Amino acid sequence: MTTKQSDQTLIRVEDLQMHFKKGQIKALDGVSLEIQKGEVLVIIGPSGSGKSTLLRCLNRLEVPTGGHIYVDNVDITNPKVEIHAYRQKRGMVFQHFHLFPNMTVLRNMTLAPMKLLKKSKQEAEEQALKLLDRVGLKNRADAYPSQLSGGQKQRIAIVRALCMNPEIMLFDEPTSALDPEMVGEVLEVMRELAKEGMTMAVVTHEMGFAREVGSRIIFMSEGKIVEEAPPKVFFENPRSDRAKEFLSKVL
Amino acid sequence: MILLVSDTMEAWLNSAPDWMLNLPQWAYDICYDFFKSFIFDQRYLNILTGLQNTLLLTFFALLVGLALGIIVSLVRVSWDKETKNRPWGIGKFFMGLANAVCKVYLTVIRGTPVVVQIMIIFFVIMANSNNKMLAGVLAFGINSGAYVAEIIRGGIMSIEEGQFEAGRSLGFGYVSTMVHIILPQAFKAVLPTLVNEFIVLLKETAVAGYVGLIDLTRAGNIIRGVSYVDFMPLLGVAVIYLVMVMFFTWLMGRLERRLRNSDH
Ligand SMILES: Nc1ncnc2c1ncn2[C@@H]1O[C@H](COP(=O)(O)OP(=O)(O)OP(=O)(O)O)[C@@H](O)[C@H]1O
Ligand SMILES: [Mg+2]
């Protein structure tokens, strides 16, 4: 099925299902949504509601058990689709950074551009240093991940993903593993990215960030999208009881 | 012959230095045994040949073992981590077959004594050949490969899943994630264990004598037979093994310390 999608739609998700243990656990239970170019989609919801699963499906790190994900009118849930090319265009940032511990910061950032985009070492390093400069970590280019703080690691993880020139960035709780005093520096980088027009899908518990930076909020519960609204509407006037209950707990 | 031997022995004893003749009886006996075991009739040459064969055997068996171990571990890991979850096709069929073969190999080789394996290879499989060194290299290589495979597989499995996901989410395929991201970390993690496997292998080749290959142990045993001295040749052999093992253990310690210091 290839219905036409508008030029502004990057990803279209249709009735996505993700069942574990032969359907006993429905991590995703019929999720449909569109992600438009340049928007910051913030996904929130209680623990276990399927936020990570949804994000991981967008990159096919998890293969959904049902439904479709269309990118450029191609259904990337089809196992015959070569997913690598699509993944190159999606930056992904994890809760636990996952920097390569045996490589310097610079090498972490130049590996994929050199091996996958066939950039020269010089070209890749130039770009990496520029990005490092932007997040204020140019002087740590030769450091190893073990020598960095959590906030620094996460900033490196973000620019490592940016080195591939992605058209969308996926964040899965990027600040949840950080000490409180380091949350701000990472959110600042993300805020800058949003301002520059980067398309982003962000799973987060940082409600301040969601309200300020998000262009749209998706509230999930038990594998379903329960509510979808602009931040102002969602935070000031949640419709569903579950969203109200959730907000009363986290705000 | 005996006469000749004792003649020469006596000749040597006559010309033995004074300090030796003046030793207490037990010390004199030791010197006498030592001479009889290693010096007389250039018997140390046996030891040298044996040592050379042991080292050659260990070295080439190690190469075969490493090559086999790497291949088998990659097949096993690739199946468990990747191919198993793919849709059925010709590729998956052959990987499944290779994986099954590897599993049988690991079970059989680790489940039977290496002495039996080397005898089967030399007397049965290579019945038409008399190349003992080749039989030894194959037997110990194939044997060691099974252990190396499990060591490397353990190393790969010890790398956290997040490293695979980070690689894949950057756009690396399964193979290039392995090559560029996982294997360098895994090898670093298992290097000390691999050196240890090498030490084990060095000692295990001592049973190569079962197919008539003159390794260090066999050389000592031959000297024991011709010199009628039991303890000294075996002691000499043991000391040589011990020195080699201590050397490699020391090397492993240094390696481990360096890896730990550069812990990134
Ligand atoms: N590989 C898996 N096997 C079995 N169940 C799984 C698996 N992955 C996720 N689940 C289940 O799917 C549900 C959704 O998980 P998911 O990680 O997407 O939630 P989440 O919204 O990200 O929660 P959190 O806020 O805690 O990160 C949970 O009930 C979880 O236990
Ligand atoms: Mg999660």
Image (spheres, coloured by chain):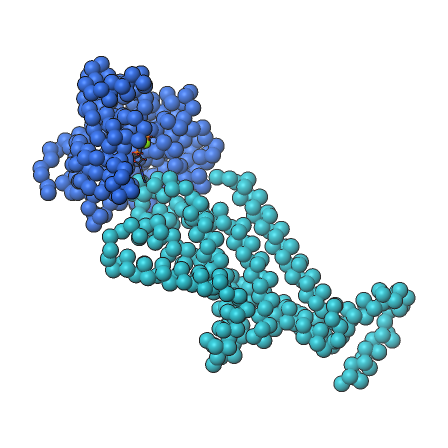
Chain colours: A blue, B cyan
Residue at 54 percent of width and 41 percent of height:
B260
Relative image position of residue B226 (x, y in whole percent): 72, 78
With B148 as the anchor, is B39 left or right in this view?
A: right
Relative image position of residue B206 (x, y in whole percent): 60, 67
Query: Vertically, is B45 above or below A224?
Result: below
Q: Quadrant of ligand 1?
A: top left
Asked where in the image residue A54 lies, by quadrant, the reply is top left
Asked where in the image residue A86 lies, by quadrant, the reply is top left
Relative image position of residue B228 (x, y in whole percent): 75, 75
Residue at 14 percent of width and 40 percent of height:
A73
Foreground residue among B253 and B154 = B154
Residue at 69 percent of width and 61 percent of height:
B239
With A98 as the anchor, is B200 left or right in this view?
A: right
Query: Vertically, is A234 above or below B108?
Result: above
With A175 as the anchor, is A31 left or right in this view?
A: left
Residue A120 shows in the view = no
